[in-house]
């Protein structure tokens, strides 16, 4: 708590200075931020998450004492290479469109025989208690590096998810009457000194979608796309969305389809 | 109980560019935990880099370094195929090491 309010205090001071200074100074600051972003991207601790995730992927656990190696992520049982680039997609066995996180929960329950409660025990980690989900996601997305994004977009359920994601993106609600588009719907918006991409257009969606999930320096943890959406909804003061729900999957699917063709560049590093 | 560690080394002209990632909490001793008590100091103190078994860098680092640190450095006179070993030792006496070959 103390750390949080301290950080907020520091940020406010920085913002005041930025407002008071001349535009030329703001330009310099922007360059410095870009330099910083480049520096943190060069050696990403996300790779450490990938290593731990690979171990968890092959670790036998749960009532069935099984590993996740037989999990079908869409390209066939146990096929991990390039699988993330083809997600979210429609899965015949569940009859719904699923993203990586929802599919992992499904595999934990079906292959390892774990209860829903157990599989969801720690969806978001922190420095003291890391999350199994975040490790697994790091490993799997890392296996799609360089693979062009190609989320499923032909099945009627996939088309439905895309349309639902689009509707949710522009849906205004909550005490502030915000939608995703309030911040990510037009050029030139920012939060503090972070430029916000326009996620409803392919260039912005490509840039953002191919660098998430990402290691966040401020949390010193790797964060998943489901976490990203959860936190956006928190910032918009919406009720907390359910992890792996049709709504969050639809939003993910909307961005993934817009990012089509861009090679996956993550897992990235973010401030 | 040390987490994973990963190193990469690549020739850049006449030196090897080495990059190493390590998992470590790097607690400064200044932070308070959820229970309001200070979190004990726990940070890497020594960093050693060996080229083909010979120590080429000995570094002393402190609390000022972030959690899960990333280091990069250049080693002159290295050749492709040379073995680089990187190890750390923290204030609790825990250690870890990793090896890589110069590519």
Image (cartoon, grey):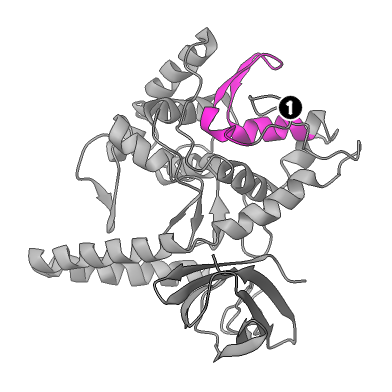
Left or right, B12 with respect to B78, comes to left
Using the image, name the chain to which the residue with label 1 belongs: A
Q: Residue at x 49, y 84 (%)?
A: B64
Q: Nearer the viewer, residue B92 or A45?
A: A45
User: Horizontal and vertical percent for residue A236?
Assistant: 39, 41
Magenta stretch contains residue A101:
yes
Q: What's drawn in magenta, residue-wise?
A: A81-108
User: Horizontal and vertical percent for residue A63?
Assistant: 91, 38
Q: Is residue A163 visible?
A: yes
Quadrant location of the C terminus of chain B?
A: bottom right
Q: Residue at x 41, y 46 (%)?
A: A235
User: Horizontal and vertical percent for residue A219?
Assistant: 52, 61
Q: Nearer the viewer, residue B89 or A22?
A: B89
> Mark 1: few, some, or many residues within 10 Å (few <14, many ≥20)?
few
Q: Quadrant of residue B82?
A: bottom right
Q: Give the farthest residue toward the top.
A: A156
Left or right, A150 with respect to A27, comes to right
Q: Residue at x 59, y 28 (%)?
A: A245
Q: Residue at x 35, y 61 (%)?
A: A37
Query: Vertically, is A231 above or below B49?
Result: above
Query: Vertically, is A253 above or below B4?
Result: above
Q: Residue at label 1? A: A77
Magenta stretch contains residue A36:
no
User: Horizontal and vertical percent for residue B80?
Assistant: 54, 70
Quadrant location of the N terminus of chain B?
A: bottom right
Q: Is residue B23 visible?
A: no
């Amino acid at each position: 708590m103390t750390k949080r309010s301290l950080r907020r205090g520091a940020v406010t001071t920085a913002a005041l200075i930025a407002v008071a200074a001349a535009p030329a100074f703001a330009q310099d600051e922007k360059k410095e931020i870009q330099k910083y972003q480049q520096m943190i991207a060069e050696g990403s601790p996300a790779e450490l998450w990938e290593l731990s995730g690979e171990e968890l992927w092959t670790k036998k656990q749960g009532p069935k004492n099984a590993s996740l190696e037989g999990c079908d992520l869409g390209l066939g049982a146990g096929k991990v290479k390039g699988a993330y680039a083809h997600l979210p997609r429609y899965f015949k066995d569940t009859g719904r469109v699923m993203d990586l996180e929802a599919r992992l929960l499904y595999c934990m329950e079906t292959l390892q025989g774990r209860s829903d409660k157990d599989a969801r025990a720690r969806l978001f980690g922190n420095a003291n208690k890391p999350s199994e989900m975040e490790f697994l996601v790091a490993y799997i997305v890392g296996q799609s590096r360089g693979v062009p994004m190609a989320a499923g977009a032909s099945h009627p359920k996939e088309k439905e998810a895309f349309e639902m994601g689009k509707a949710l993106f522009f849906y205004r609600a909550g005490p502030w009457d915000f939608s995703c588009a309030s911040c990510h719907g037009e050029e030139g918006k920012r939060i503090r000194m972070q430029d916000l991409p326009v996620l409803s257009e392919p260039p912005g969606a490509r840039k953002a979608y191919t660098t998430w999930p990402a290691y966040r320096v401020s949390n010193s943890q790797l964060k998943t796309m489901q976490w990203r959406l959860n936190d956006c909804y928190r910032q918009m003061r919406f009720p907390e969305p359910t992890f792996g729900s049709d709504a969050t999957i639809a939003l993910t699917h909307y961005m993934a389809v817009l990012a089509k063709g861009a090679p996956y560049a993550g897992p990235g590093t973010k401030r | 109980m040390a987490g994973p560690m990963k190193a990469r080394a690549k020739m850049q002209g006449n030196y090897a560019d080495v990059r190493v990632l390590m998992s470590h909490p790097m607690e400064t001793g200044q932070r308070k935990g959820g229970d309001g008590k200070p979190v004990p100091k726990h940070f890497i103190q020594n960093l050693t880099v060996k080229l083909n078994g010979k120590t080429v860098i000995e570094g002393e680092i402190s609390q000022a370094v972030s959690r899960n640190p990333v280091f990069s450095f250049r080693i002159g006179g290295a050749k492709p195929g040379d073995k680089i070993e990187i190890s750390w030792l923290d204030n609790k006496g825990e250690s870890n090491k990793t090896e890589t070959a110069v590519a």
